[in-house]
Amino acid sequence: MRTTRFPFFLCALLAAGTVVAEDAKEPEAAEVVIATVNGTPYGLDLFRLFYLERLQQNQGENSPALQEQAFNEFMSMVVASQEAARRKLEQDPDVGVALELQRMKILSNAALASMAEEITPTEDDLKKAYEEVKENASRTEYKARHILVKDEEEAKKMIEELEGGADFGDLAREHSLGPTGKNGGELEWFDASQMVAPFSEAVAAMEVGSFTKTPVQTQFGWHVIELQDSRKAEPPTFEDAKPQLVALLKRQKLSEKLIEMRDGAMVELNEEVVKLKPTGDAPADAPKGD
């Protein structure tokens, strides 16, 4: 039977991540044929992997429409790959190199995932890493609002009006060019790293409740800033941070293991292709000693 429509029954199967046959048996996905094209069967496990990649590209928004689109793309890929086989394109050197590269990537990722599973950070390692996180999390956050205008003279005029008793929010709503203008110039809580240097430096030097007496210039224009409040950022608790710490330490240990494996590998370089950098301060063309 020919079809260009996505088999609707697969919607539930893909979403659940299982395959349920009509007779209530539960065969493995590899045993389930999703389609036979020109006499060649293709398993549900193959399509499922293809679909999961499409799902990630679509930021996880699973839908029948996406499933149908993915199935049609999968079928197009099937017939195109069959045509490549008919043309014996696997024998093309460029195609062969590309296939080998993809094979290496897949095997490399599988090896890294397997190695990561074998790494179990100790509680002491986790607590040590947590102390570093706490130290880095010790930062000041600011609550501020600003008026953004095109030129310095206009910014000075805003400051004069504020000194005369004008309302900061009203001036921002009337004059500010930034997207926050309609909200009276209100900014969310931020730390210095989230703002451009002139802005963050000005805020750090201010007292709560004050506004800048001279305009602050950034690449966006000229700012008049009011510091509304400040606070010390609270680091996450150890338990809340633990999953991220485990992942961090696994990455670090994995990186160390890869360096160890590279250093321990027997490598013979073709120096006509791979030009080695000279060691120390010796120039590249320095004569070698006997």
Image (spheres, rainbow, N blue to C red):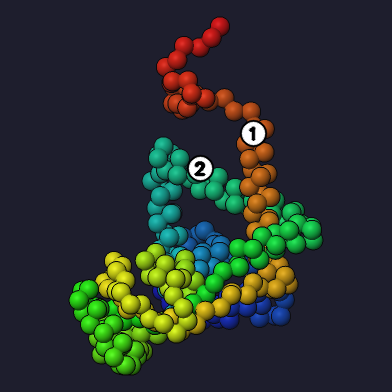
Residue at horizontal 50%, vertical 44%? 101
Q: Nearer the viewer, residue 284 or 42?
A: 284
Chain-order first, disc 2 or disc 1 = 2
In the rendering, at what x and y percent does residue 159 appear? 28, 82
Give the answer, above or below, for where 207 lies relative to 201: below
- Residue position for label 1: 263
In the rendering, at what x and y percent does residue 65 appear? 44, 80
- The amino acid at mark 1 is Asp
Disc 1 element:
helix
- The amino acid at mark 2 is Glu
In the rendering, at what x and y percent does residue 26 appear? 71, 74
**From mark 2 to mark 1, how far is it between C-alphas?**
24 Å
- Pointer 2 and pointer 1: residues touching (CB < 8 Å)? no
**Left or right of 98 on screen, residue 256:** right
Q: Nearer the viewer, residue 108 or 45?
A: 108
Dot 2 surroundings within 10 Å: few (below 14), some, or many (20 or more)?
Answer: few
**Left or right of 40 on screen, residue 23:** right
Disc 2 element:
helix
**Left or right of 208 on screen, residue 167:** left
Q: Residue furthest front?
A: 164
Give the answer, above or below, for where 238 lies relative to 171: above
Dot 1 surroundings within 10 Å: few (below 14), some, or many (20 or more)?
Answer: few
Quarter holding the C terminus is top right
- Numbered label attached to residue 100: 2
Q: Nearer the viewer, residue 129 or 195?
A: 195
Quick check: can you spot residue 261? yes
In the rendering, at what x and y percent does residue 136 appear? 60, 63
Residue at horizontal 50%, vertical 59%? 39
Give the answer, above or below, for where 258 lies relative to 217: above
Residue at horizontal 65%, vertical 51%? 252
Say which of marks 2 and 1 sits in front: 1
